[in-house]
Image (cartoon, rainbow, N blue to C red):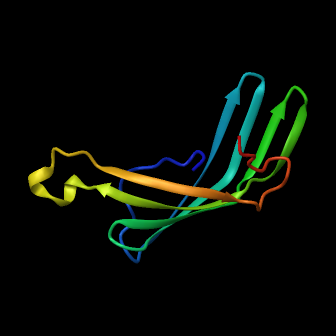
Amino acid sequence: MRGISVSPSVQPRGTLQLESGWHAERAGAQRTQHWGEALVRTGLTERVELRVVLDSWEMTDTPDGHREGLRDAAIGAKVALLDAAAHAAHRWLPQAALVVGTTLPTGHHSVAHVPA
């Protein structure tokens, strides 16, 4: 989900975590900044968490001009597939998780996600 890092661990059931930040990208002459990115994670079960990405403010500068506005929000889930740390006999196994999600059409048209 955008610039937010993803680890294979899930939030424990009944807990809530807020991750927030800023990131910048540069591709050739295009420069983009994202302000106020916020990911809310909550554990639904021992192996599943709900993930909600709140709108962030995006500013993009290109040779053709400047655009800014709110990006689309997103919703998804993370499912823990392998958790070797929970089983002492299998600590050699890696941790693995599946993350799925989609954007919601909540952002400004100039910066909203457009599927390829």
x then y, percent, for residue 89 = 8, 54
x then y, percent, for residue 72 = 72, 56
In the rendered image, the residue lying farthest to the bottom is 14
Picture residue at 32% right of the left edge, 56% below the top = 81
Picture residue at 60% right of the left edge, 47% below the top = 2
Picture residue at 80% right of the left edge, 47% below the top = 111
In the rendered image of this protein, does residue 102 appear above or below residue 12? above
Q: Nearer the viewer, residue 49 or 33?
A: 49
Q: Nearer the viewer, residue 38 or 8?
A: 8
The mark total stands at: 0
x then y, percent, for residue 113 = 73, 48
Q: Nearer the viewer, residue 51 or 114?
A: 114
Quadrant where the C terminus sits is top right
* Side of 91 where 57 appears, left or right: right
Picture residue at 77% right of the left edge, 50% below the top = 112
In the rendered image of this protein, does residue 55 appear above or below residue 50? above
In the rendered image, the residue lying farthest to the front is 116
x then y, percent, for residue 55 = 70, 59
In the rendered image of this protein, does residue 30 appear above or below residue 81? above
In the rendered image, the residue lying farthest to the left is 89
Q: Quadrant of residue 62?
A: top right
